[in-house]
Image (tube, rainbow, N blue to C red):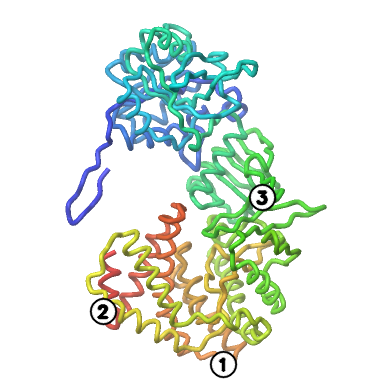
């Protein structure tokens, strides 16, 4: 791993040199029929097998070699290893019959006995800190250090007041004894061992838990290190697998994953959380909602799949609330991904579903959202229908528009003509905001009094410097007074142009596609400002890069529609303001990505920085003579 600092390449070597052993021989019986086709270690999580994710995490802390035992579908595991980036570090240990958690270690004793080593079940995903586990093991002189947590369903490891293991109930099954009163924890499937453990491991079929107890009785320290609160998932059955896939999508800030080695989905309707793995063939007219399509699977033409795992010759039905997460407080399934702190839940009422918006008690946008919904609806702007309001609980219910945003709709490879057609519909919404809503804005007192003016332009440029330039890139401004002067001139000029109603965050994640028709959401930040800001937000959107020719045609379409619907529209003034709005919007977006990833912990926004910077550099190059200091700063990022 390398980084580049002040012209010097710096190597970051992993901290440890421990080996790792990955048990991968199991039959995966609880995962059938999935494991009839794929061994558990190769179960894909957004295109990458479980075992690869584990090795990648291990490799950030240790450069040691990797041992893997084999039995079930060994040839498939070998094939993956041969083609992996880790092939040169891996040593294989075939088993026939399967030797169990203890016998597997004994079988690899010659490989593992050179020093301390890590064992990690190949069907476990967690954010457990390997460095803390290893450092504790080394500093305490333990013969074994087990990563454990308080998980009532699996609490069968009995520990004393010092956190040392003294017994294991129903050894080998992870089944607690409910009649026994003792301090108990659950083993996570992750441990560090000293080579002395082999004195207590039997040859042939045996369990590691038996070795723990024997070592403990012999006076060795077997420590249970508590990781309660860390994320942990045992991929032991189809539900836990589906839950992991959905969780991984959420971590990526996505609802759709489409493997590049599957056929296109331009004629497919993907809704909710949808994962299409490699070498899949999607039939024309297929509808998929909350589904995982496993490698080499096919879907039938014009068929409908919902809440299931689809395999080459099977379909496993799932409980939506188990996979997506159920809220007892609201009584629905949590939906939506984004930068907001508001929560959205899908709730069934009678024969249909509605969406509950739950706001924090200090959320000043709540009442504004309600007022704007009523106003925009009255202007025939396509927003979700407001069904009910509960101001005391800061809760409101809306029409359910499904789960497909323009951003997720574009995750499928679409025909250029279909993309342009959809964007024209989106541009129609912006025209309605900038004409009809503007004409009747006096009917919405809250909106008419909220201007996007000089102060807001300056807030956004300060946000860019504080959250992105300084906060994320750690760059010191060399000539702050000159940069401040340029920001002042940009804001002053922008504030001088004619204003209309503007959405203020008019981008692909805030457009829902419902029955192939775009609808507007997240409009509570609307203000009176530059229409060009909305146009810049959607046509120069870091979330989706439009083909240049298409963008030019869409811009021309917007201008022609504005001419037709407003006698106040001035194309020259609009085009003059557009470049300033593009600069401003790119800086705002980068500031937001810095804030949301660094402060809010939503790391998935980091992946959009590259495109945001590309757009900003492209546009500043067009105005570098007017804003030389900003140009120097941007080009240094």
Total numbered labels: 3
Q: Identify the residue position indicated by label 1 in the image.
A: 568
Q: Nearer the viewer, residue 130 or 617?
A: 130
**Which tag is nearer the camera, tag 2 or tag 3?**
2
Q: In 3D space, how far apart are the residues under numbered discs 1 and 2 (Cα atoms)?
A: 36 Å
Density class for disc 2 (Cα within 10 Å; few <14, some 14-19, many ≥20) is: some
Position of the N terminus, as image quadrant, is top left
Instruction: Reply above or below: 298 against 86.
Output: below
Q: Mark 1 or mark 3: name the one nearer the start of the chain.
A: 3
Q: Horizontal placement of 87 versus 553: left or right?
A: left
Q: Horizontal placement of 97 versus 366: left or right?
A: left
Q: Identify the residue position indicated by label 3 in the image.
A: 286
Q: Horizontal placement of 391 versus 139: left or right?
A: right
Query: Residue at the front extreme?
Result: 161
**Which tag is nearer the camera, tag 1 or tag 3?**
1
Q: Mark 1 or mark 2: name the one nearer the start of the chain.
A: 2
Q: Residue at x 67, y 50 (%)?
A: 287
Where residue 500 appears, x then y in whole percent?
56, 84
Q: Residue at x 25, y 46 (%)?
A: 2
Where residue 465 appears, x then y in whole percent?
34, 68
Q: Horizontal placement of 478 versus 37: left or right?
A: left
Where residue 579 appears, x then y in whole percent?
40, 80
Q: In 3D space, how far apart are the residues under numbered discs 1 and 3 (Cα atoms)?
A: 46 Å
Q: Identify the residue position indicated by label 2 in the image.
A: 482
């Amino acid at each position: 791993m390398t980084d580049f600092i002040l012209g010097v390449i710096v190597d970051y070597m992993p901290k440890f040199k421990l080996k790792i052993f990955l048990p991968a021989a199991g039959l995966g019986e609880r995962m059938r029929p999935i494991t009839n086709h794929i061994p558990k270690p190769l179960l894909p999580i957004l295109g990458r097998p479980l075992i690869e994710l584990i090795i990648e995490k291990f490799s950030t802390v240790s450069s040691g070699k990797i041992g893997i035992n084999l039995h079930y579908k060994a040839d498939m595991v070998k094939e993956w290893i041969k083609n992996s980036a880790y092939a040169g570090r891996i040593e294989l240990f075939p088993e026939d019959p399967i030797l169990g958690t203890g016998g597997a270690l004994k079988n690899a004793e010659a490989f593992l006995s050179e020093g301390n080593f890590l064992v990690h079940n190949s069907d476990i995903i967690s954010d457990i800190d390997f460095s803390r586990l290893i450092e504790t093991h080394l500093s305490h002189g333990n013969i074994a250090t087990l990563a454990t947590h308080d998980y009532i369903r699996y609490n069968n490891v009995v520990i004393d007041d010092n956190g040392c293991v003294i017994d294991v109930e129903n050894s080998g099954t992870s089944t607690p004894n409910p009649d026994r009163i003792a301090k108990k924890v659950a083993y996570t499937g992750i441990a560090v061992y000293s080579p002395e453990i082999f004195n207590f491991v039997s040859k042939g079929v045996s369990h590691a838990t038996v070795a723990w107890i024997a070592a403990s009785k012999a006076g060795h320290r077997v420590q249970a290190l508590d990781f309660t609160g860390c994320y942990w998932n045992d991929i032991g059955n189809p539900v836990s697998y589906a839950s992991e896939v959905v969780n991984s999508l959420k971590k990526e800030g996505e609802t759709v994953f489409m493997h590049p080695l599957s056929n296109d989905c331009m004629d497919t309707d993907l809704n909710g959380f949808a994962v299409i793995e490699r070498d899949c063939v999607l039939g024309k007219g297929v509808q998929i909602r909350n589904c995982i399509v496993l490698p080499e699977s096919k879907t039938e033409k014009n068929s409908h799949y919902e809440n299931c795992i689809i395999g080459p010759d099977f379909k496993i039905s799932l409980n939506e609330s188990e996979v997506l997460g159920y809220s007892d407080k609201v009584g629905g399934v949590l939906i939506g991904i984004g930068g907001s702190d508001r929560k959205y839940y899908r709730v069934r009422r009678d024969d249909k579903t509605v969406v509950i918006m739950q706001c924090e008690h200090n959320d000043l946008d709540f009442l504004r959202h309600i007022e704007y919904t009523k106003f925009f609806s009255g202007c025939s702007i396509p927003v979700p229908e407001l069904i009910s309001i509960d101001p005391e609980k800061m809760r409101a219910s809306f029409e359910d528009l499904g789960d497909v945003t323009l951003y997720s709709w574009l995750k499928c490879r679409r025909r250029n003509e279909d993309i342009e057609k959809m964007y024209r519909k989106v541009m129609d919404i912006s025209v309605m905001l900038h004409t009809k809503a503007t004409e009747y804005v006096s009917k919405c007192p809250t909106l008419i009094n909220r201007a996007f003016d000089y102060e807001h332009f300056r807030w956004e440029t300060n946000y860019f410097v504080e959250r992105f330039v300084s906060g994320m890139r750690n760059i010191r401004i060399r000539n702050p007074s000159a940069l401040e002067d340029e920001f002042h001139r940009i804001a002053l000029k922008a504030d001088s142009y004619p204003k209309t109603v503007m959405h203020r965050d008019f981008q692909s994640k805030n457009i829902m596609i419902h029955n192939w028709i775009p609808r507007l959401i997240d409009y509570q930040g609307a203000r009176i400002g530059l229409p060009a800001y909305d146009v810049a937000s959607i046509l120069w959107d870091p979330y989706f890069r439009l083909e240049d020719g298409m963008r030019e045609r869409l811009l021309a379409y917007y201008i022609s529609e504005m001419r037709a619907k407003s006698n106040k529209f001035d194309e020259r003034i609009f085009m003059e303001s557009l470049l300033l709005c593009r600069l401003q919007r790119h800086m705002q977006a980068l500031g937001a990505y810095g804030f949301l990833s660094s402060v809010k912990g939503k790391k998935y926004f980091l992946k959009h920085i590259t495109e945001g910077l590309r757009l900003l550099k492209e546009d500043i190059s067009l105005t570098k003579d007017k804003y030389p200091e900003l140009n120097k700063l941007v080009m240094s990022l």
